[in-house]
Image (cartoon, rainbow, N blue to C red):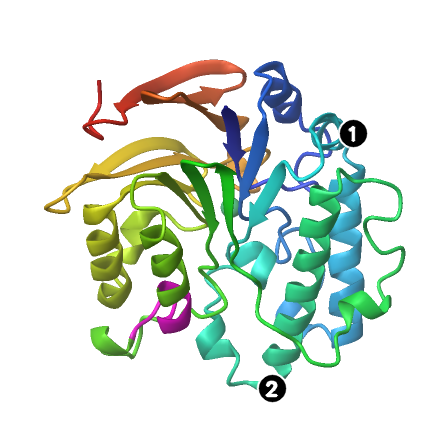
Amino acid sequence: MKIAFASCMCTRVFSDQPVWEQVAAQKPDRLVLLGDSVYLDIATPVMPQDMTDDEFAQHLYALYSELLAQKRFRALVQGLPQGSVFATWDDHDFLWNDACGASLAKQPQHRSKIALSTAFFTAYRRALALGLAPGSFPAAYNDAAFWPAHPQPLTTPSVALAPDLWLHLSDGRTHRTALWPLAERQRHLLGVAQRAQLGAAVAAAPNALHLLASGSILADYKRYPNDWQWLMQLAARQRVLALSGDIHRNELDAFFTGGWPLHEATSSGAAVKDAVVVGQARQNFGLLDVQPGEVRIELFEKGVRKQARTLLRSSWLPA
Ligand SMILES: [Fe+2]
């Protein structure tokens, strides 16, 4: 099974996005989007912090509509079978740069914006899962789907892609506390409940390969010792490969846990510049080829494979 992964695309910076054609050329079976599908705080005359709820909903609607109408993105998603495209988010599609939901939710004017961005992201996920079929995304910003009476946090499903291959979609924004001025033990990235849910899902398939989809790179977890220690212990006992985004670069990494190593493949910068609006144009994506005995990871820039690593599923070490 071939799984493409990518993150960080901004229609306001690149209305044309060749990366999706480069992904399609690899003929993936699945696509995982790892955050910053839209940039709510880039190239906007009014920042989301200063918008009314109605303005914020119109802004969300405009940005998701632009992405869902992006020709090459649309062709890639429509070319995959229904139920093959998955997404999680990061700060820019959650609210704005470095937004920490657990801290912002204490402020009523931000709480209502979190409810809106969550509803929009949920609708976006649904449209992706339906292959962008007609009517799969609501037709107006004031559709009831975007204004739930009882807002719920984003779901974090665990999906069996194959009997021995699981994809876990984490949410690194809703429950994240700020770093300052909190003591380390008070800081949370995924939060207590999400850690318990993900941990149970991973432990329930002890011999499977577990892909942890994360908007943030794992280095971010180190500043959240509750989450970092939890992840180290989880990965020590089961084979975990984190797929991450955020940094507008491709990278491969691995961490010593005392048990199985924890691997990470980052692909970020599908259609942004290195600092979103300035710097070098990025067209980055990653590809996993999951075979019975090994997992081949390849990272592409402008359609050219630049990095690769093969992990043996028996030893969970590089070949
Ligand atoms: Fe980004």
Percent of width and height locating residue 11:
70, 40
Asked if residue 280 can be seen in this view, the reply is: no
Examine the rendering and report whether any part of residue 130 can be seen. yes
Q: Quadrant of residue 120?
A: bottom right
Q: Which mark is residue 71?
A: 1
Q: Residues within 10 Å of mark 1 (few under 14, many from 20)?
A: some
Q: Is residue 31 toward the left or the right of residue 205 in the image?
A: right
Residue at x 77% of width, y 67% of height: 146
Residue plotted at (50% across, 77% down)? 104
Indicate the secondary structure of the residue bearing disc 1: helix
Q: Secondary structure at mark 2?
A: helix
Residue positioned most to the left: 258
What distance separates the C-alpha of mark 1 from that of mark 2?
A: 38 Å
Pointer 2: what residue? 108
Decide if residue 68 is on the left or right side of residue 20: right
Q: Would you say 239 lies left or right of 281 here?
A: left
On whether ligand 1 comes within 8 Å of the CB at mark 1, the answer is no
- Compared with residue 309, is residue 222 higher up or lower down, i.e. above or below? below
First to last magenta residue range: 187-195
